[in-house]
Amino acid sequence: MKTESKNETSLSNANGRTDESLESNTENEEMEPASTACPSSQLMLGLLDEFTQIYKDKLERLENSSLKMEEKNYLQTKVSLLERWLGELGEQNAVLVRTLGELEGEAATRVSILQDSLRTLQPSCHSTAEALTLQRQQVLEALAGREAAEGRVLQLTEQLQLCQTYNCNLRADVDTLLHVVSRASRDGDWRLDDIALLSVSPEQLLAAGVPVSGSTTPSCGLKGSMSPSVAPCTDPFPRLAGASETRSSLSDVQTDAADDSRRCSADQAELQLSVNIDALAARLADAERECEAARAEASRLRGECEAARAEASRLRGECETARAEASRLRGECAVLRERASETELSHETCDAAVQRLHRELHEALRISRELQEQITSRSATPLQDAEAVSEKSILVRELQGHLATARHECALRDATVTKLERQLVSVRAQLCERQERSEYLEQQLVQLQQQLARAHSHAQQLAQQVVMDAIMVVVQLNRWFSLAGGST
């Protein structure tokens, strides 16, 4: 009994430490849900296993010490131990149900906050999507203008290249003709067969009838060779002016193309921004769908919690019924023990009376034999012997009557003892049935606690997922708004 009291004290201390650890674990999970969800569930399951192992060890020690104890004390100790176990399991179940309700309330609050934030962000997202559609159309128009400008730039570049080539050819022809003119003014030699013109042929220069070969005087050759075809070749400035104008228009076109390129790059950035916004809108839709799924899961968890609470209340009622039945059985056991003690006392009294009557009977038989012997040996005094024999016979009849009465009382006491033993056997069978029922209830409580722990961990994981998705959506929207503000 001392060891049992020590075990009860250690178990109560362990229960207190476990309740404190459960409360601290719940607080830590509320403060840091993103990092302690799975370890807390594992810790709860470990504590439940530890409780179960502690009581199993106590039951094993009680079974091992049952040989040294009386059966009544053994049953009473076992029933009290099972009642304590049921009480502590009921307290743990209440703590788990309360924790699950708090977590469900917190998850519902977070879901409502996310829904409000999503409803707040939805109009701005729609307006942003419309603005992006308009900007996309502007970008497409700018791209079409850029393609047209690029085609114009290519045409102007080809024209510039042709003008530059023609200008170079004209300069070469002018240099060649100037050489011929200088030679003719110096030597009077107007031969043109040894020259090569790139843009004007010699026939065009000598259309006025100047001979191709031969020599004339310098003045005649110089005056006669001045035909209308040579005059434009000797004056390249109009062509150079046209080329410079072309170059200036080409530079203007290049400037316009650079501006168009910058605008196109800006439009491309806006297009990329629109793509990002579309992706964010898709993410937002996914987040809304996940919120819907989370709400459905939360409603399902609420239903499971209600069912678990109903089951817990039913189990509490069954535990209370089992406790009441156990107390009634303890009272019956006490009454039966009192009756058994009384029966044992009466049995001992009967045994003592029977033994006393047997001794008296043996004494009476011995006296009767002695009297008979005296009667047979002494025939002188028959009247005195007859009186003594009659007295002894009366005494023997009285003793026989007492013996029959004692035997009847012994039979009645034996029947009462047999009835009490039968009642004791039935009480023991009822105790065994109650024990099996309590073990079944304990298994149901353990399974319910495991289900509650799994539901608790699942609810925490859903809440963490919803919070992380909301944080990602808010971060992406803030980033998009910052990019939109920088581009505008």
Image (cartoon, rainbow, N blue to C red):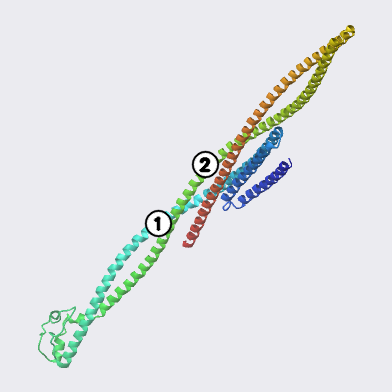
Q: Nearer the viewer, residue 484 or 429?
A: 429
Please, what is the three-letter code of the amino acid marked with disc 1? Arg
- Residue 323: give its label: none
In the image, taking residue 383 as reference, residue 334 lies left or right, namely left
Q: Is residue 458 above or below residue 434?
A: below
Which residue sits at x=50%, y=58%?
479
- Residue 16: x and y in percent read 69, 46
Q: Nearer the viewer, residue 206 or 411?
A: 411
- Residue 296: give its label: 2
| SS at circle 1 | helix
In 3D space, how far apart are the residues under numbered discs 2 and 1 (Cα atoms)? 38 Å
Quadrant of the image containing the N terminus: top right
* Residue 282 in sight from this viewpoint: yes
| SS at circle 2 | helix
Which residue sits at x=48%, y=62%?
486
In the image, taking residue 203 as reference, residue 286 lies left or right, namely right
Q: Is residue 313 above or below residue 99?
A: above
Q: Which residue is mark 1?
A: 136
Mark 1 Cα within 10 Å, few/some/many (few <14, many 20+)? Answer: many
Tell me, yes or no, whether the two marked residues, 2 and 1, touch with CB atoms within 8 Å. Answer: no
- Residue 393: x and y in percent read 83, 11
The numbered mark, 2 or 1, whose residue comes first in the sequence reads 1
Q: Is residue 269 above or below residue 109?
A: below
- Residue 480: x and y in percent read 48, 57
